[in-house]
Amino acid sequence: MAITREELIKKYLDFFKSKGHKVIPSASLVPANDPTVLFTTAGMHPLVPFLMGQRHPLGNRVVNVQKCIRTGDIDDVGDDFHLTFFEMLGNWSLGDYFKKEGINYTFEFLTKKLKIPVENLAVSVFEGDKNVPKDTESEKIWKSLGIKQERIAYLPKKNNWWEHPGNNTPCGPCTEIFYWVGKGKPKGNPKINEKEWAEIGNDVLMEFTKVSPEKYIPSKQKNIDFGGGCERTLAILNDMRSVYETSTFQPIMRVIEKISDRKNLTNNTSARIIADHIKASIFIIGDGISPANIERGYVLRRLIRRAIRHGYLLGIKENFTAKLVDSILEVYQDYKELKQNKNKIIAELDKEENRFRQTLESGMHEFDKIIKSKKRISGKDAFLLYQSYGFPIEMTQELAKENKIKLDLKEFEQENKKHQELSRTASAGAFKSGLADQSEKTIRLHTATHLLNEALRRVLGDEVRQRGSNITPERLRFDFNFPRKLTDEEIKKVENLVNEKINNALPVTREEIKLKEAVKSGAQAEFGAKYPDVVSVYSIDDFSKEICTGPHVKNTEEIGKFKIIKEESSAAGIRRIKAVVE
């Protein structure tokens, strides 16, 4: 009997609730106060402060299903298992149980609750290196559970180790769980015959602190961070060869078949890319992002336009992206933000498709003309396709690869220097999972956003609400709703009020209370954000009160002098302030 997405999620949450875990909501795809990533790529992002040692309001065992976006494997989307948008089953021990219990829970859920035969499973453990020894403890635990020696792969750091680029951060070995997807009886392990084993879960065993790239010391707090792919697990449980055969994709595939007037497109690469990319786009728009030429908006634009081009390959000549919305919302009824933002989602998809379709066909003709007369695509040609026809550079790269033609990317980048940066580096590298910067400067800036938020409300009016923020060691960026540009006088008033509260040396205190009580007490919350039943509330004397996870200074005098360096439009009805502390 087939198992549905809803049934799998319920089994997972119920199992970990029975083990003392509290359910926390899925966070936004836009990470709060984490400049290392553009999107939430794993369930651990909202838990950063708690992995670093701060106490979680709901205790030290939590579980959830987190919506995620990853673009690092975008070129592999269309195969059986890689996705841009996916749901991650995640459970955490925040300084509570460790390897034995963590691995036992993972094994018990897979084999007892999901009834996966143990003979169909294999695992990997960290083989060790010059800085950290081999993870023999995990190896012994797996053997005690019935995993045979020949099913255990010993893999190096690049495969079985998790760490953040920064120093003084948690890190540790991983132990991954694989399912047999090859033909016949299971054989070997993920090191010997990798392609016949599909990863379905990963326990990150955070037992070290990275002091430097060459020095690791045992952590005071040891954490377990499990992540498992919902769609992959669903495919495996239903004995399916790909995630596109599951209930998370079939309703979407049927609409694509109807629109393209084709049958049996489940295994068609273009149809798969369309279904994945438009699903991802719908979730991104649902979290407040619009297509643009920078950062998250650029990634969104790239996904929509790539889907449209693959629609072109299927012979779809009319607008179709918005026609997929209902089928996707039907699958994900538990994400209320999608239904609430349905009109905006449809409008943004239609607008972007209209914009791109105006030039797509002529752009394809131009591309064909270029490759007929030349054996390579110059940077100038690539820039022409971008500037005049709206082709993201990644699309030109993809077309060049399909036609086995070289592209002069270096020359393209030189041509593009005079224009807005396309955030190509973000697409390539900013999506790696990692802890946010926890430096003293960042903590000062983060606390300053609380003062800024309240100062804006007092100067401009109570209707002002936070719409997002991004903090790096160099500056803070704060988005808020307001219908017009601020006057110089208003900017100065806000800046002076923040500095006044800094100079007053106000105490910063934290308390854990129920969400309803926090809201009732007047604590500010970010617009559209989801919170657990019990939250951390930070108060800056009697001036500011916000629901937040931290980290913060203990007294405002630690912040330093606050200075607004820019005030600008971020989107329709949304203003953006950039500021520094000195």
Image (cartoon, rainbow, N blue to C red):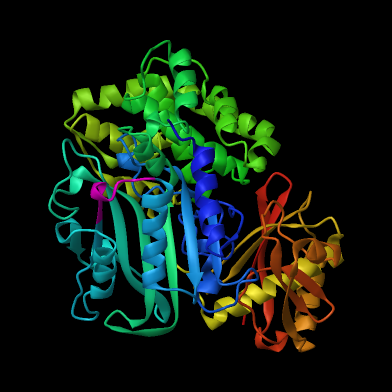
- Toward which corner of the image does residue 495 lie, by quadrant? bottom right
Tell whether position 195 is magenta. Answer: no
Q: Which is more toward the observer, 442 or 356?
A: 442
Examine the rendered structure and indicate whether residue 429 appears above or below residue 311.
below
User: In this rendering, is residue 494 above or below 124?
Assistant: below
Q: Quadrant of the C terminus?
A: bottom right
Residue 417 in sight from this viewpoint: no
User: In which quadrant of the rendered view does residue 463 lie?
Assistant: bottom right
User: Quick check: 213 above or below 352?
Assistant: below
The residue sitting at 27% across, 64% down in the picture is 142
Q: For the image shown, how many numbered marks are present on the structure?
A: 0
Residue 138 screen position, x and y as percent: 28, 70
User: Residue 492 appears at what percent x and percent y?
Assistant: 78, 71
Left or right: where 268 falls relative to 89: left
Q: Is residue 152 left or right of residue 25?
A: left
The residues colored magenta run 115-122
Residue at 39% x, 12% y: name it: 262
Give the position of the N terminus as an image quadrant: top left
Q: Is residue 131 left or right of residue 434?
A: left
Asked if residue 40 can be seen in this view, the reply is: yes
- Residue 120 appears at what percent x and percent y? 25, 46
Q: Nearer the viewer, residue 272 or 393?
A: 272
| Residue 467 image-quadrant placement | bottom right
**Residue 119 magenta:** yes
Q: Is residue 179 above or below residue 1?
A: below
Query: x, y percentage for residue 513?
Result: 75, 70
Furthest residue to the top?
Answer: 261
Is 429 in front, or is 485? Answer: 429
